[in-house]
Amino acid sequence: MSDHHVVVVGGGFGGLQLVNGLKGAGVKITLVDRRNHHLFQPLLYQVATTILSTSEIAWPIRRLYADRPDVTVLLGEVTGVDSGAKRVSLRNGMTLGYDTLVLATGATHAYFGRDEWEPVAPGLKTLEDATTIRRRVLLAFEKAEMEADPAVRDALLTFTIVGAGPTGVELAGIIAELAHFTLPKEFRNIDTRKTRVVLVEAGPRVLPTFAEELSAYAQKALEKLGVEVLLGKPVTECSADGVRIGETFTPSRTIVWAAGVTASPAARWLDIPADRAGRAIVEKDLSAPGLPDVFIIGDTASVMREDGKPVPGIAPAAKQQGGYVAKVIRARLSDKPAPAPFKYWHQGSLATIGQSAAIIDFGRIKLKGWIAWWIWGIAHIYFLIGTRSRFAVAWNWLWIYLSGQHSARLITQRETMREEG
């Protein structure tokens, strides 16, 4: 093994794909992440909506590389990069020297300058976010069951999702199904079928990155489930009592934020240009401008396609970038010609609306409905890590499909972000 040290910050799709691509390359790899697990984010909303448990979509990073002695895994948070000295600083005071650095630090929620909304309108990026949302959804029904004031009860049974991208649409559909089909027989003092699920989008349509015909189908499918879709109406206020949509205040005790993301501070660490969302603008080989030994991939990077459109911040894009950078590093170490500039291959866009409909946009081929839902499910099961997870997720989906019952409806932790009384 050579002394070349590759430090990878971030154990998401891009970071893991890069580490996997360097297997047998003869380098020392240190993988740093703030959490000890890799998370399959595309199914995170199903943890938030009581379909899956946390262990079915997350895996300990150390376990993934237990048989790779070239890989050292550290649980830590990076706070800065000294590109001149080639050192990475961690919050605990530790520093790591590197020969090659790969930043795959992802993104977090963007509240467009209103960060004070976060406690009452959590986003969905981590397992903690998902379990927080799940607790709030389930507690809302429990509190409504015991509430004597009709106005308060209605507010408890009003769920507002801000942002109609894939996450917002998927959350709205599942919450509506949970309220209208799964829970009615379990409560005595309330009729959960009267629950309001409000999906708010400032733009003109849901799922704006999909073809218009698929977007229209998704909206009709949501409305069929009982979701109220409000388009062209920005949110101007979020509080513990509700949300203001345009000039109208809607009492709502559960709000979920799915309206935007902002990148990690990687661009600031390196003092390089970034786009409006904070993503670092990178070279064609995904290296940082003026820093050939530093690469930035995934949601942290702003990468343009040949048609001038940005590469989307989705898992397949991050994996392609991680695999590409691994090839670049291998070529440099072996003094071989560098690969051609990174080129993103779009494999299609997928989104579900509840548990029986989905839309898929493959470009020329567009699918919707029941067939699309099965293809969506097979694709997601395929990309899960490990046979146990694939079997568990497939079994849960089959059980829900046959029985209509969600299996992960436990309130296991105290709600700490808002008073329960």
Image (cartoon, rainbow, N blue to C red):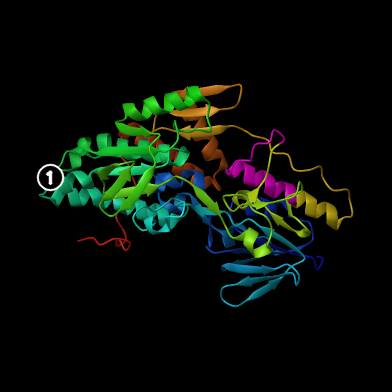
In the image as oriented, which residue stretches furthest toward the bottom?
93
Figure disc tally: 1
The answer to whether residue 133 is left or right of residue 184 is right
At x 49% / y 26%, what residue is drawn? 372
Which secondary structure lies at badge 1?
helix
Q: Quadrant where the C terminus lies?
A: bottom left
Q: Position of residue 23 (x, y in %)?
A: 73, 55
The answer to whether residue 403 is left or right of residue 302 is left
- Please, what is the three-letter code of the amino acid marked with disc 1? Pro
At x 22% / y 47%, what residue is drawn? 156
Q: Is residue 8 magenta?
A: no
The answer to whether residue 380 is left or right of residue 302 is left
Q: Quadrant where the N terminus lies?
A: bottom right
The answer to whether residue 151 is left or right of residue 328 is left
Q: Which residue is mark 1?
A: 150
Q: Which residues are magenta?
A: 306-325
- Is residue 16 depicted above or below 202 in this figure? below
At x 38% / y 26%, what residue is drawn? 221
> Which one is in front, 202 or 98?
202
Q: Position of residue 254 (x, y in %)?
A: 30, 49
At x 71% / y 47%, what residue is drawn? 323
Q: Position of residue 117 (x, y in %)?
A: 37, 55
- Is residue 14 depicted above or below 65 in this figure? above
Residue 106 visible somewhere in the drawing: yes
Residue 409 visible somewhere in the drawing: no
Q: Position of residue 46 (x, y in %)?
A: 41, 44
> Which one is in front, 267 or 276?
276
Indicate the quadrant where residue 179 lies. top left
Q: Dot 1, how many residues are within 10 Å of its Cα: few (below 14), some (14-19), or many (20+)?
A: few
Q: Is residue 308 magenta?
A: yes
